[in-house]
Amino acid sequence: MSGQSTLPRESPLPGSVAPPRAATRTRRPWPVLIVILLAIVLGGGGAAWWRFAPAPVAATAVLAYGTIDIRQTQLAFNDNDRILRMLVQEGDSVRKGQLLAELDATRLQASVDKATADADAARNTLTRLRNGSRPQEIAQARATVAAAQATEANSRVTYARYARLASTSAESLLNRDNAEQALKVATANRESAEQALALAVEGPRWEDIKVAEAQLAAAEAALALARQQLADARLYAPADGTIEDRILEPGDMASPDRPALTLDLTNPVYARAYLPERELGRVRPGMRAFVESDAYPGERIPAWVGFIATTAEFTPKTVQTTELRTELVFRMHVYACNPDGRLRLGAPVTVVIPLGDNAPQARGEQPCG
């Protein structure tokens, strides 16, 4: 070899073990690659969803929760007497104006008869005064005047004769004085008859007519009161509904402060619902609505928003919502016609108020036909 020396390899000694050659181990980076690939896939998918996903759909209706409010009226007679008849039972459906019960009206009918007679008398008195004197009365007054004038003329002649004779002492002074007094009486009677004739011709005074008019008005008012008391002996239904309680029975003593019947007002009804504060700007009185009840799943009963409170309150404990939360709400009344009585008083309901094509209309609480 030229200029290079080659060291001889050491040969292993007999019986010795040669050391193993250093082996180079290479770890494969599979876990790291999987994580990177997953990150790339998820990032790309998220970017694609963000780019191509549809915009969130705006809410199409507002939901509110509440109960059908209990609306009852206590029916009592407007007079004191014994009940003669009760014409309805508990659970009966009644219509507005239907006769429900009657009192014994014997005493009240007698009061009407007396008031009628008093009114007739006052009316006839006023008619007589307004008509004035009859022709026969005026003729009678004229005849009285004529008789008084004749008597006066005769008394004047008699007095003149006695006065002439007395001046010559042919007649006594006593007879002359008596004749003079007779003349004065005849003159006064003639003047009285003439005044009576004037009154007969002129007719009654306007003050007397006014008094008679006032007396007639009082009599007619008394008659109207008696008739109203007689009408109050009958108890009528003030609205459509269902008899809840029959409190009194025939023979019981009725009075204005003692109810005889309890009437449930079932048509229309209204749901006492609670509107969340965040929905206040989207709901107005007069908007269309629907009422849903668990008793009729999938069925919506037409309704309308009639009232929204102006004062906020916290969610009442009686409101059954899908989530238990405490938030400010506004009480509202949602009216619904209920002719078949499906909405029971006190039942929990869900109110659905559509937001599209739902302009408020002036409705309020309207009766249902």
Image (tube, helix red, strand yellow):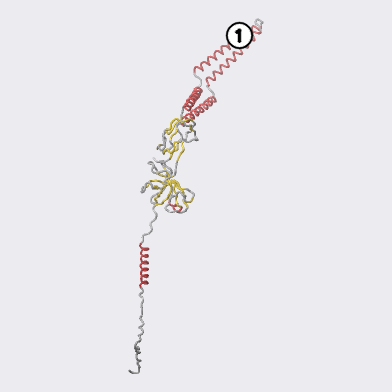
202 vs 241: above or below: above
- The x, y position of residue 178, in whole percent, is 63, 10
- The x, y position of residue 298, in whole percent, is 36, 49
Residue lying furthest top: 170
Residue shown at 55% from the left, 12% from the top = 147
Quadrant housing residue 46: bottom left
Element under label 1?
A: helix
Location of the C terminus by quadrant is top left
Location of the N terminus by quadrant is bottom left
* Horizontal relation, residue 298 to residue 328: left or right: left
Front-most of residues 62 and 349: 349
* Horizontal relation, residue 268 to residue 168: left or right: left
108 vs 179: above or below: below
Count numbered badges in the picture.
1
Quadrant housing residue 151: top right
- The x, y position of residue 236, in whole percent, is 43, 34
- The x, y position of residue 157, in whole percent, is 60, 9
Check disc 1 and report the residue beneath it.
Answer: 158
Residue lying furthest left: 1
Q: For mark 1, does the 10 Å Cα neighbourhood hold few (<14), some (14 to 19), or many (20 or more) residues?
A: some
Front-most of residues 248 and 365: 248
Quadrant housing residue 30: bottom left
195 vs 238: above or below: above
Amino acid type, label 1: Thr
